[in-house]
């Protein structure tokens, strides 16, 4: 019986922590080696802010990213779920306004950019059951969101590719619409022999093998929130997509390429918890391999 108060106290402490961790935002830097020809690039990966009109804290944190970075990155890549409902559109655009990139800002959308969050029991339990069925919800004002992003210079990669000419050669960026909503197309996923670097963007990271089999160097995605609840020594319980739980968050070597799944900056307003899984923005530094060097070990 003496264990009961201690158990209740521990449970209360864990619950309080899981409600506090979403506010513990961080910016981290990871380095990885790509092919022998690619340029050295700094790439800021942002995903899953799930902004609403009331989230002034996250809006302010994103707006201060240029100061946190200390320099303009070469690329900024956004992988969707920018808003949780339409009240987040203007705050998101205000937060993104100071962000700049030397070679461009590119994005794909997620399910919450098409449908506004709506409370239902599965909203909470899906993170523990792996249920990834799409529930009917009110449509979001996607047109207004995209119009605002593009007015700031963001380039959509909705089932399409773009190339950038640099002194080192051509960089290919290719995106797919959200596989969670089954809006994606993959016929455009390919790289040219002229491409010195190829990067794929996706919200729900179901379409990973298609990119890697096409020879892409890096795939960036979101959606999973890195599991949102991660059990110590075990990891994520679910991913809410086809991605194995072991790859739910962070940077991983997969075959000849790399996969970076962002833990995300926010979480749905009806699942406002995180455990052992802090929200983050990630600065990825891509470096070319030295001839004769095995690039697989070079990540930190």
Image (cartoon, grey):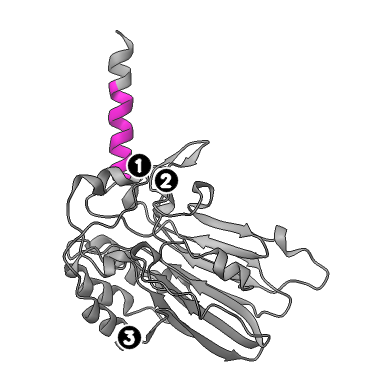
Residue 3 locus on image (x, y percent): 33, 13
Range of magenta residues: 8-20
Marked residue nearer the N-terminal end (2 or 3): 3
> Secondary structure beneath disc 2?
loop
Is most of the magenta stretch helix, strand or loop?
helix
Q: Name the residue under label 3.
A: 150
Q: Mark on residue 238?
A: 2
Quadrant position of residue 143 = bottom left
Count neighbours of disc 1 (C-alpha within 10 A) and say few if under 14, some if 14 to 19, many if 20 or more: few
Residue 98 locus on image (x, y percent): 34, 79
- 182 left or right of 286 in image: left
Q: How many labels does the image show?
A: 3
What residue do we see at 42% from left, 50% from top?
A: 239
Quadrant position of residue 86 = bottom left
What residue do we see at 27% from left, 77% from top?
A: 93
Residue 105 locus on image (x, y percent): 43, 81
Q: Mark 1 points at which residue?
A: 129
């Amino acid at each position: 019986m003496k264990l009961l108060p201690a158990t209740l106290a521990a449970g209360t402490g864990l619950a309080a922590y899981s409600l506090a961790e979403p506010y513990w935002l961080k910016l981290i830097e990871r380095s990885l080696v790509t092919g022998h020809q690619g340029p050295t690039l700094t790439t800021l990966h942002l995903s899953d802010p799930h902004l609403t009109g009331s989230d002034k804290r996250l809006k302010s944190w994103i707006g201060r990213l240029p100061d946190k970075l200390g320099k303009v990155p070469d690329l900024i890549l956004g992988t969707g779920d920018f808003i949780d409902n339409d009240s987040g559109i203007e705050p998101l655009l205000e937060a993104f306004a100071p962000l700049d990139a030397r070679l461009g800002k590119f994005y794909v959308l997620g399910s919450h950019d098409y449908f506004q969050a709506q409370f239902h029991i599965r909203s909470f339990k899906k993170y523990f059951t792996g249920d990834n069925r799409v529930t009917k919800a009110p449509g979001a004002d996607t047109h207004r969101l995209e119009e605002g992003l593009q007015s700031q210079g963001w380039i959509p990669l909705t089932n399409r590719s773009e190339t950038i000419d640099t002194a080192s050669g051509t960089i290919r960026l290719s995106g797919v619409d959200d596989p969670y909503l089954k809006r994606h197309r993959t016929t455009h996923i390919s790289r040219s022999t002229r491409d010195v670097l190829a990067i794929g963007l996706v919200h729900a990271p179901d379409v990973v093998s298609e990119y890697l089999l096409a020879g892409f160097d890096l795939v960036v995605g979101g959606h999973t929130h890195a599991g949102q609840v991660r059990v110590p020594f075990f990891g994520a319980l679910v991913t809410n997509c086809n991605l194995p739980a072991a790859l739910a968050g962070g940077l991983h070597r997969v075959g000849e390429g790399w996969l970076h799944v962002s833990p995300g900056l926010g979480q749905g307003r009806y699942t406002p918890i995180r455990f052992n899984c802090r929200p983050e923005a990630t600065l990825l530094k891509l470096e070319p391999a030295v001839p004769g060097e095995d690039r697989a070990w070079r990540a930190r």
